[in-house]
Amino acid sequence: MKDFYGVHLDTPFMLGTAQYPSPAILAEAFTRSKASVATVSLRREASDNKAGQDFWQLIKQLNVRVLPNTAGCHTVKEAVTTAHMAREIFGTKWIKLEVIGEEDTLQPDVFGLVEAAKILSEDGFQVFPYTTEDLVVADKLVNAGCRVLMPWGAPIGSGMGLNNVFGLRALRSHFPDIPLVVDAGLGLPSQATQAMELGIDAILLNTAVSKAGDPAMMAEAFALAIRAGQLAVGADPMEPRDMASPSTPIFGKAFLD
Amino acid sequence: MIPQWNKSQTVTVIGAGVAGLCVATELLQRGITPQIIEAQTEPGPASCSWWAGGMLSPLCEAESAEEAVTRYGKKAAAWWQSHTGLVKQNGSLVVALKRDHSDLNRFAKRTQDYELMDSAAIAALEPDLSGPFTQGLFYKSEAHLAPREALTALKNNLLKQGVKFVYCAAQPETIAEHSLVVDCRGINAKNDTRGLRGVKGEMLILRCPDLAIQRPIRLLHPRIPLYIVPRGDGVYMLGATMIESSAKTHASVRSVMELLNAAYALNPAFGEAEILEIGVDSRPAFNDNLPKIRHRGHIITANGLYRHGFLLAPSLAIMVANYIHTGTKPEWFESV
């Protein structure tokens, strides 16, 4: 598995911490997911004082690496300010960069994203940009200093899976050395397997687990599915072909009469 | 009865929010006349329950809450009706805009005992919601009440029956050990209650005489789930945000804007409403968002009602009073 800014992760699973029925269920979901990374969004207001401390304590107790994000930011300035606050609070250079361009689809404003990625990279941040599968945007993000790319599968929280398999495949072959994380849009474990089979390096999701009827069970389902995809790639799958190829050799069959 | 208490001892309840008032009421029913210590002379904005929605909707809560919330919550409406007479049994309605119908399906899947409504049925039930809503869920057995009036009614009942209120701020440890203390301070007990955290909520009270909504309405939305509870006389309570923070101040522009946006989506007449109050407080909650009763020495704590104050306080109070009276450890008892 590729490193993420020099950090080796035990599992290619990053799990969000929002919208669980309770902190207790959140903690159980993390245990069963074996996720290596927790994404945490920062409410700017909560950073003013100690008011949000309890939740941070809870996240720390998960014993996973924290990837703070700039969820809900609509402008470059907002995202940069939030990133700075996150660096102070969590003591990490990692930042999942979101610059939202449209309220209904929550799709990234890729122009603002590139701009913010450049500012933050020059400032020493290690940026995980939430982007579309667009190749040209990805190239500009890499030029801006990003060494991880996080293309969406589908709009955040939609559960539609991989909407542009071709685009993801193209991204994979153009950036063989950059770790790719499919971030957003997954609803089912099989979609995570599919992404891993495409050669994606890790999966980031939240809603599919937190809004399931049994979040902890779904977390484990995703863990197994991600592992399945990872193993499949490592096992070097067979090439599909048009005609049948007998799996039982006829040659050598016993004559019974 | 519990070994730490005998009938000659006084019982002191600290806190006269919804938890403390319910506990005192249940103690009285068992022949125990408690005294109450409370910092405020009247029910008011310093207590979290002042800002409650007042929905008694155990069925809807099943969407995200533990099963016990629904099971005990079902007892709430009858309790409040018998002690205050303020319960309105008009059911509650859940709607979503067309593009969010998958949220409505999800809600239906997680809950029970509802009627599926089409636009005609919605319009017949709530004429002010006809138009944008083509599907809804009607929970006929649910109810609501005006929480501020209910707090005042409970307090007046207690006063009438000889319960003494002492108005000062108190810590449970400072009460002499010959009195059994029930600590119902809610989020104010955060510093000496292990695992208690605050979940901030912001809410609005609007006057909109153009509308005549009869029952709590939940509008499902991926970003801003909203509920509106009618308070009578064209007054509505709009709530509520859920933010992991123990801050009790600072209603943010974004939260207020989102709540108002959602209200406007429900009916554009809310655009003309008068904003009466902007409220903000922090709900006391434990990690599993369920209440807990703990007992150490002469102090019993009853806390963690989260956003289910009016829904679960009666059951919490019954458990505390039974525990003191009979010594039986209740479901929400946690050994320390």
Image (spheres, rainbow, N blue to C red):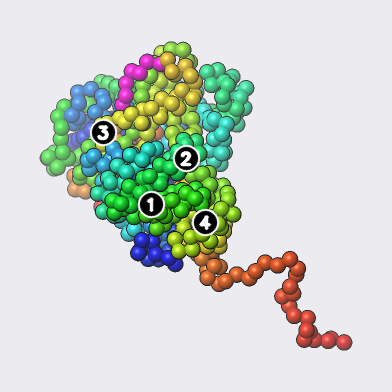
User: What main secondary structure does the magenta stretch of the protein show?
Assistant: strand
In this view, the mark in front (3 or 4) = 4
Q: Distance between the residues labelled 1 and 2?
A: 23 Å
Write down the residue under mark 1.
A144
Q: What amino acid type is highlighted by mark number 4? A: Leu
Measuring from the top left, give residue A114's x and y in whole percent.
40, 46
- Share a chain, discs 3 and 4? no
Query: Regarding mark 3 in the picture, which secondary structure is present there?
Result: loop
Q: Distance between the residues labelled 4 and 1?
A: 17 Å
Q: How far apart are marks 2 and 3 (CA)?
A: 30 Å
Number of labels in the image equals 4
The reply, left or right, for residue A187 in relation to residue B298 is: right
Residue A106 image label = 2
Looking at the image, is mark 4 or mark 2 earlier in the sequence?
A: 2
Q: Report if residue B276 lies within the magenta region.
A: yes
The reply, left or right, for residue A54 in relation to residue B82 is: left
Write down the residue under mark 3.
B248
Query: Regarding mark 2 in the picture, which secondary structure is present there?
Result: loop
Measuring from the top left, give residue B255's x and y in whole percent.
36, 31
Disc 2, disc 3: CB below 8 Å?
Answer: no
Measuring from the top left, give residue B294's x and y in whole percent.
27, 46
Q: Residue at 43% x, 51% y: name it.
A: A140
Write down the residue under mark 4.
A171
